[in-house]
Image (cartoon, grey):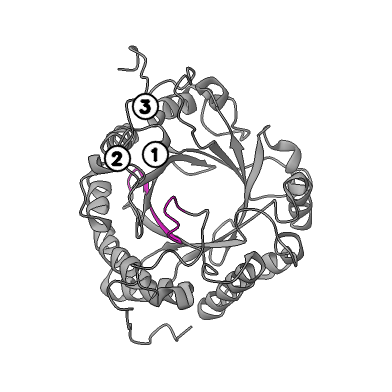
Amino acid sequence: MSAPDAPLRPPASGTLGGHTAGQLLRLADVVGLGTDDAGVYARTLTEMLGGAAERPLHLPPPNPTFLSDDHTPVEFSLSFTQGEDPTLRMLVEPGCDAPGRAANGRAGLRAVREVARRWGFSTDRLDELEDLFLPPAPEGPLALWCALELLPGGVPKVKVYLNPAASGQNRAPATVAEALRRLGHHRAFDALPPGDRHLFFALDLGDWAEPRVKVYLAHQDLSAGEAGALCRTETGPTPAETEAFFRIAAGHDADDLTSPQVRRPVQSCHAFTETATGRPSGFTLYVPVRDYARHDGEALERAGTLLRHHGQAPDPLLRAVSAVTDRHPEDGVGLVAYLALAHQQGRPPRVTAYVSSEAYHVRPPTGPLPVPAAAR
């Protein structure tokens, strides 16, 4: 990667890098990031994409990726906290053009170590887990993703996402338990709620006041009542608060899953910041709203309801959607991929909307979904 003050040479228009960097620059304007900061982050994005950045968009994606529906290896999100400006984040699969999962992981690891050198933070915690999550012949849907929280000043907060099923899905619980143990969280695994499978293991790297270790679980065909019982934090949301978020994000109570549509699982995430008690300090619920909405107009309406409920105006999200696409929300579904509600100890609740790049494909709108009369 080039030096952080090197001039930005964006990839040509009509390429993956040109498309996603342009989206990032417009999103940066929506959240009020300065031109210099936006340039640093756009350059970082294209460098993380490696050779895929110059790949013309008329060609198919470099490899299938679990990161998005249309296999774009980039996703954006806007995080909203009452009393604060929205925060822009990007999620990247740095090894997206590597030949195979093992090479993908090695490329991702190199990219993370490069940004660590650039911004002067340690990768010791990640290095400690390399053999667990990046074995010689990894399995599963991903190897390594990197998320950057794009802050004013040109220095992001960095997160790394790893695959618990790298040594096989049946080994995923043991892999997560061993990773937590190595990082000093000896009692954390027993604090997790039941789930259908372990999806991600994530680490905060760099300048975090309280770096988190996060464990993500999948919950297939989850009901609102079951969602309300997932949180294991002492000071997190009440079951009623979680249920209310779930019902709004899903568009109905979701206890009656009579639709033949196959939906992605709801995800829970518990964050651990201290090692003494084994108790998590954070809880997040993620609803794949694109599987519960006929089109993105409905998804945006629900996002607006959630934002207003938590003291935020939806206008920045609407401008963000316009910044990444010129299509009408009703013309597709999946532009708004997930809606999430996060509770972190000592912080107000945070609503996050995940926005797809849609570099390659727009998923068409679906037919009507069953909505109980009470919800209407």
Examine the image and state in which quarter residue 89 appears.
Answer: bottom left
Image marks 2 and 1: residues in contact by CB distance under 8 Å: yes
Is residue 346 rendered to the left or right of residue 183?
left
Is residue 27 rendered to the left or right of residue 207?
left
The kind of secondary structure element at disc 3 is loop
State how far apart marks 1 and 3 are (Cα): 11 Å
Task: Identify the residue shown where x is 33% and y is 52%.
Answer: 86
* Quadrant of the snapshot with the C terminus: top left
| Residue topped by disc 3 | 251
The kind of secondary structure element at disc 2 is helix
Q: Amino acid at mark 2?
A: Asp
Is residue 78 rendered to the left or right of residue 189?
left
| Residue topped by disc 1 | 290
Q: Nearer the viewer, mark 2 or mark 3?
A: 2
State how far apart marks 2 and 3 are (Cα): 12 Å
Q: Nearer the viewer, mark 1 or mark 3?
A: 1
Coordinates of residue 19 in the picture (x, y in percent)? 31, 67
Q: Residues within 10 Å of mark 1 (few under 14, many from 20)?
A: many
Q: Amino acid at mark 3?
A: Gly
| Residue topped by disc 2 | 296
Q: Bounds of the magenta span? A: 68-83
State how far apart marks 2 and 1 are (Cα): 7 Å
Q: Residues within 10 Å of mark 2 (few under 14, many from 20)?
A: many
Coordinates of residue 9 in the picture (x, y in percent)? 32, 83
